[in-house]
Image: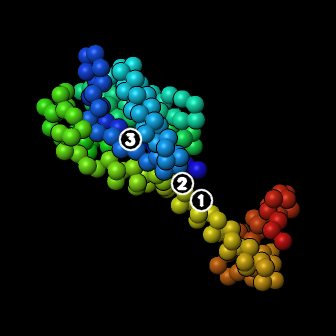
Amino acid sequence: MVRVFSLSVFFKGATEARLLKTTSDLQSFPFFQRGTVNEFMTFASRTIVERTQPTMRQSVKQDAYMCHVYVRADNLAGVLIADHEYPQRVAHTLITKILDDFTAKVPAGLWPNGSEAQIPFDALPAFLTRYQDPKEADPLLKMQTDLDETKIILKNTIEAVLKRGENLEDMVYKSEQLSMQSKAFYKTAKKTNSCCSFS
């Protein structure tokens, strides 16, 4: 099952990364392990940010998790920790969206010395909830899914017509909407290409 576990925003300083905001969804872990898992995810996120150069993106595999990070030129960084099924491109699209929103709402002067309590940015939990479904974060993925659903609907419609006892070949020849040229093309294609046989 596709799952995002953690979203974090950091400021990458000269010697260390400062955590500005974080949120997590650890419901899939046993209750008494959640604190430990959360600490590990924060530690891993900070370490990856500290070892990522500005203007770089990385995706790092750690056991059953993927840690996606982007450090911008202004040293603002975002980290998304998810399972392996969460698409990499979608993860980086979401990180960019979060950092853009953060920049619009939090003055840059607060980043170098800010703490979680001081930073006025409460949108991370909403991002985490909304973008558990990768299609919400990536319009291209959503469009592809919509196209796939359309193909399924069309296929089911053709199958439903054929199930009523109608023969596609008879329908083509009886159709007044098809030109003689189209009917001849269908007949030729049916003879030369066995994949055109629907009956």
- Residue appearing at x 53%, y 61% in the figure: 146
Q: Is residue 80 left or right of residue 100?
A: right
- Say what amino acid the circle numbered 3 marks: Leu
Which structural element holds mark 3?
strand
Tell me the residue that label 3 is attached to: 7
- Say what amino acid the circle numbered 1 marks: Asp
- Residue appearing at x 27%, y 27% in the figure: 18
Considering depth in this image, is 171 or 40 the residue closer to the camera? 40
User: Viewer-nearest of labels 3 and 1?
Assistant: 3
Report the Cα–Cα distance between label 2 and label 1. Answer: 6 Å
Q: Are marks 2 and 1 in contact (CB under 8 Å)?
A: yes
Q: Position of residue 114 (x, y in %)?
A: 19, 32
Q: Is residue 146 left or right of residue 77?
A: right
Considering depth in this image, is 54 or 116 the residue closer to the camera? 116
Q: Is residue 122 left or right of residue 50?
A: left
Label whose residue precedes the other's in the sequence (3 or 1):
3
> By what rule are the colours in the image chosen?
rainbow
